[in-house]
Image (tube, rainbow, N blue to C red):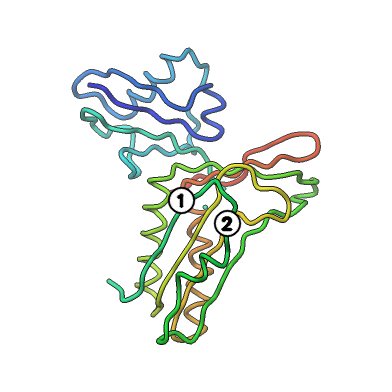
Amino acid sequence: MLITVLFFAGARERVGIGRVELNVSDGATLGAAVDQAIASVGADYVLPANVMLARNGAYADRSTMLIECDEIAIIPPVSGGADGISDIWITDDEIDADEVVSRVGSDRDGAVVVFHGITRDHNEGRSVLWLEYEAYSPMAENMMTRIIAEMRDKWEIGDVAVCHRTGRVDIGQTSMVLAVSAAHRRPAFESALYFIDRLKEVVPIWKKEYFEGGEVWIGDTPG
């Protein structure tokens, strides 16, 4: 069977490649395929315990059985029914915040809460030079859609729009804009905060920090 194995962020750097096309035997498991992919490129890399695995955009464990044309992703630690609409996109272009905000709100909504994530010039005592973001885009968008569904289960909100950057984001530039509308301010504020916290927990978007004297991937394992 032909499958694809994708490596991201720190795992990609350790293996030395981002994508491996692989022939595996019938009945192969996800874990065996990942091990085979690493061995096929001659990498000296053992998956840490905090690395998650995904099959076709959904988290899975090593015992999952594979079928032809499956897409496997190695997910190292990351940086995190309704009337309304949900608008989600990931881009390597600079974010137009006004465009994001313009996609939410209507005459029924009395509040629109907007969050701008902006690159700051320091972190944990380090002088930050810039950030670089990497995303497993299809899965990241799917997981953000799930978070918005969770928000709608908890609060009465209207429209939600979110745009996240990939690539280099310099000091003072925007890495993410989130806009949430609602009839009242409290659900708009609380649901926006919930989205940001859940993003860091489950969405496969990674942040690499470049600082004076070095570089490091920031965050925890999603899932």
- Examine the image and state in which quarter residue 109 appears: bottom left
Point out which mark residue 95 bears.
2
* Residue type, numbered disc 2: Ile
Residue 108 vs residue 29: left or right? right
Give the image location of residue 156, x and y in percent.
39, 80
Camera-nearest label, 2 or 1: 2
Residues at marks 2 and 1, CA–CA distance in whole angstroms: 19 Å
Q: Nearer the viewer, residue 92 or 56?
A: 92
Circle 2 — which element? loop
Residue 74 vs residue 132: left or right? left
Residue visible at 39% across and 20% down?
Answer: 37
* Residue type, numbered disc 1: Val
Residue 26 vs residue 188: left or right? left
Residue visible at 22% across and 18% down?
Answer: 25
Give the image location of residue 135, x and y in percent.
49, 43
Residue visible at 42% across and 15% down?
Answer: 39
Report which residue position mark 1 lands on: 203
